[in-house]
Every structure is written in C-alpha cells, then in structure tokens.
Image (cartoon, rainbow, N blue to C red):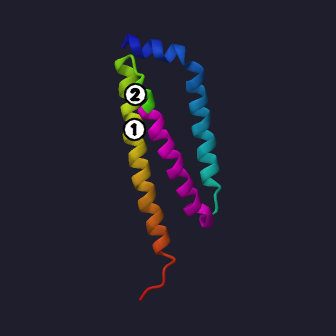
Amino acid sequence: MNELLEFLSNNLELIYILIFAIFIGVELIKNVPSVLHTPLMSGANALSGVVIVGAILVMLEAKTTLALTLGFIAVVLGIINVVGGFAVTDRMLQMFKKKK
C-alpha cells in the first residue's frame, strides 16, 4: 500500500495528464463521423501496438512489484484492444463487400 501511495504522490502530474487525455479522447471520438470509424480504428490498433511494446519495455526495467504489475496490465489491455479493434474493423469492412 505504501508503494502505491508513494507512486501516486510522485506522479501526480502524470495522473492529471492521463485524466485530461481521457476526457479529450472521449470528446474527439464522439464527434467522428461514421464514415471515418474504420480508418480511425486502424490507427488506434497501430497505437495500441506501440503501447504493448512500451509496456513490455517498462516491464523489463521494473524494479518494484507495482511497476511490473502495471506493465503486465498494460500489455493485457493493449492486446485486448488490438484484437477487438481488428475484429471490429474486419466486421465493418465486411459491410462493404458485395454479397454473392
């Protein structure tokens, strides 16, 4: 518990930036026209791939259990995001194919 409190107090500015980024991301996604959702999903998949690589690099340098746990959670969530993104993109692209 002390590790968590120390982490939060040392990285308070980063937590504020994360919360701000979440709010901006939600507002941006809400205003995207439906025509652009497929290209946007493909871009998000690429970014999630970068997040996975970054999280693995963080895990390699982890000195505390908290850092290792957060890195592992980031890898798992990134993989879920990539797989789900590809599934949604594939389903959207299937809508544009001619039916036999």
Residue 61 drawn at (x, y percent): 42, 22
Q: Is residue 52 magenta?
A: yes
Q: Nearer the viewer, residue 32 or 83?
A: 83
Q: Which residue is mark 2?
A: 59
The segment highlighted magenta reads 34-56
Give the residue type at disc 2: Met
C-alpha gap between disc 2 and disc 1: 9 Å
Assess whether mark 1 and mark 2 are in contact (beta carbons under 8 angstroms): yes
Residue 22 drawn at (x, y percent): 57, 39
Residue 43 drawn at (x, y percent): 56, 53
Few, some or many residues within 10 Å of mark 1 (<14, 14–19, 20+)? many
Which residue does the image show at 44% across and 59% down from the upper left?
Answer: 86
Q: Nearer the viewer, residue 65 or 50?
A: 50
Give the residue type at disc 1: Val
In the picture as drawn, the residue positioned furthest to the bottom comes out as 100
Q: Which residue is mark 1?
A: 75
Which residue does the image show at 38% across and 21% down from the upper left?
Answer: 66
Q: Is residue 71 magenta?
A: no
